[in-house]
Image (cartoon, grey):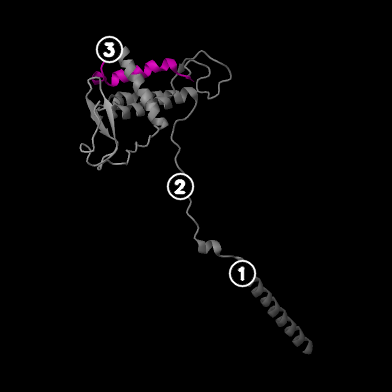
Amino acid sequence: MDLVSPQNNPNDYPSRMISSSTNNSIVINSATPNSSTATATPPPSTTPSRYENQKRRDWNTFCQYLRNHRPPMSLSMCSGVHVLEFLRYLDQFGKTKVHNNTCPFFGLPNPPAPCPCPLRQAWGSLDALIGRLRAAYEEHGGRPEVNPFGARAVRIYLREVRDFQAKARGVSYAKKRKRPKQKAIPSAQQSSDPTPTLAADATSASEFNKEITTIFSSLYFFDFLI
């Protein structure tokens, strides 16, 4: 085992020696003149939002659906027709009661008794799902002009689902219009107090009554003299 002599270490920094099985020594200086003592700070960890987590799960589910498709299908071959098949496939996992036209509870928001009508995916859930998948498709390199989740057939399908579920469930999906904000009353008008005006009118009426009384008293006295 060789030792490090002062001549081999002119800077006189402390050193360590690691020996190998071949008796060759490797010297590793514990400190060097130009070594930086600052350590690299790891980037702060950002927690994905709930929307990002849901979008990632939806994307994985759709990709798994394509892999299980018969025959298996790649994402580049996917079109709006396959997106519609995926939405109909999800209906079997729905939890929203959608009454048929022949159901006696058709159009009732709160049916009084159970019925055999099927459970479906609610329109709001499907609409939000398509929005997340449309964004995920472009994030994974897809071109917006060929995005299958933004196809015209998908938009028409969602519109038909919305209209039918609104009639079947007796609910309205129309967006509520925001009421226009009332104009604020100027502070000058708010600070004006009608009380002084009323007091002035009362004072004028009292003086007028006194003048009338004086005039009639004078006329009465004049008639008495005559």
Amino acid type for the residue under numbered disc 2: Pro
In the image, 193 versus 135, the foreground residue is 135
**As shown in the figure, which amino acid type bears the numbered disc 1?**
Pro
Query: Magenta stretch containing residue 84, yes or no?
Result: yes
Q: Look at mark 1 in the image and give the residue it sits on.
A: 196
Element assignment for label 3: loop
Residue 206 sits in which quadrant?
A: bottom right
Cα separation, mark 2 vs mark 1, equals 35 Å
Q: Are discs 1 and 3 less than 8 Å apart at CB?
A: no
Provide the secondary structure element on which disc 1 rests. helix
Q: Which mark is residue 72?
A: 3
- Tag 1 or tag 2, which sits nearer the N-term? 2
Magenta segment range?
73-97
Is 165 situated left or right of 31 in this image? right
Circle 2: element type:
loop
- Residue 181 locus on image (x, y percent): 47, 49
Residue 127 visible in rendering: no
Q: Residue furthest top?
A: 70
Most frequent secondary structure within the magenta stretch? helix
Of the pair 112 and 89, the residue shown nearer to us: 89
Q: Can you tell which mark lies on residue 180?
A: 2
Residue 109 shown left or right of residue 128 in the figure? right
User: Residue 178, position in %: x, y?
Assistant: 45, 42
Location of the N terminus by quadrant is: top left
Q: Nearer the viewer, mark 3 or mark 2?
A: 3
Q: Tell me the residue at 47%/54% (across/down).
A: 183
- Expressed as whole percent of the image width and height from the top left, the position of residue 176 reads 45, 37
Mark sitting earlier along the chain (3/2): 3
